Image (tube, rainbow, N blue to C red):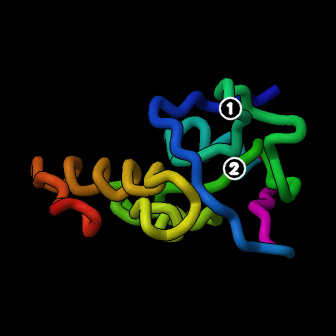
């Protein structure tokens, strides 16, 4: 059995898909695990992957994968941009954590100030 990877960054973010979900044959899933190419997995509030936390039936609860020879491409189903600023009406800016992590990984860049900051 293929064991899912545990993500170290938990981000609460909206989803907005009705039909999309990640599907792959067992060999491809094994390759994703071996190459540490699973970027995001659906999880519940406690960080547990699987069950009702997976809203669309994605294989291995995959919500995003890395691509490219240097893992510099990210494909994802959730929409962190819809929850990246407090004024967006979700009561949280958790999605911003994903963008901040990307900025840190491309050279230690600092996050831009929030639009709601003075």
In front: mark 1 or mark 2? 1
Q: Is the C terminus in the top left, top right, bottom left or bottom right quadrant?
A: bottom left
Residue 53, which numbered label? Answer: none
Quarter of the image for residue 45 reads top right
Outermost residue to the front: 118
- The answer to which of 26 and 11 lies nearer the viewer is 11
Q: Residue at x 65, y 28 (%)?
A: 47
Q: Nearer the viewer, residue 94 or 58?
A: 94
Q: How many marks?
A: 2
Looking at the rendering, the stretch of residues picked out in magenta corresponds to: 19-26
Distance CA(mark 1)–CA(mark 2): 16 Å
Using the rendered view, name the quadrant where residue 64 is placed. Answer: bottom right
**Label disc, if present, on residue 62 of the rendered structure:** 2
User: Which residue is pictured at 11% across the width and 47% down the height?
Assistant: 108
- In this view, 11 is above or below 3: below
Q: Nearer the viewer, residue 6 or 43?
A: 43
Q: Secondary structure at mark 1?
A: loop
Q: Quadrant of the N terminus?
A: top right
Q: Earlier in the sequence, mark 1 or mark 2?
A: 1
Relative height, residue 71 to residue 81 (above, below): above
Q: Which residue is mark 1?
A: 45
Mark 1 neighbour class, 10 Å CA radius: few under 14, some 14 to 19, many 20 or more: few
Q: Position of residue 2 (x, y in %)?
A: 75, 30
> In the figure, is residue 94 to the left or right of 59?
left
Image location (x, y in percent) of residue 36: 50, 39
Q: Is residue 42 on the magenta stretch?
A: no
User: Please, what secondary structure does the residue beneath circle 2 have?
Assistant: strand
Q: Main secondary structure of the magenta part?
A: loop
Question: Is 103 placed left or right of 1 in the picture?
Answer: left
- Mark 2 neighbour density, 10 Å: few (under 14) some (14–19) many (20 or more): many
Identify which residue is drawn at 34% across, 61% down: 72
> Residue 33 appears at what percent x and percent y?
60, 38
């Amino acid at each position: 059995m293929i064991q899912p990877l545990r993500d170290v960054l938990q981000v609460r973010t909206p989803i907005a898909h009705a039909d999309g979900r990640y599907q792959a044959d067992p060999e491809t899933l094994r390759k994703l695990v071996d190459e540490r190419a699973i970027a995001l997995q659906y999880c519940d509030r406690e960080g547990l992957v699987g069950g009702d936390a997976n809203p669309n039936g994605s294989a291995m609860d995959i919500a995003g994968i890395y691509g490219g020879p240097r893992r510099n491409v990210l494909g994802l189903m959730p929409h962190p941009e819809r929850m990246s600023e407090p004024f967006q009406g979700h009561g949280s800016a958790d999605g911003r954590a994903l963008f901040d992590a990307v900025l840190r990984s491309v050279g230690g860049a600092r996050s831009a100030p929030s639009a709601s900051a003075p």
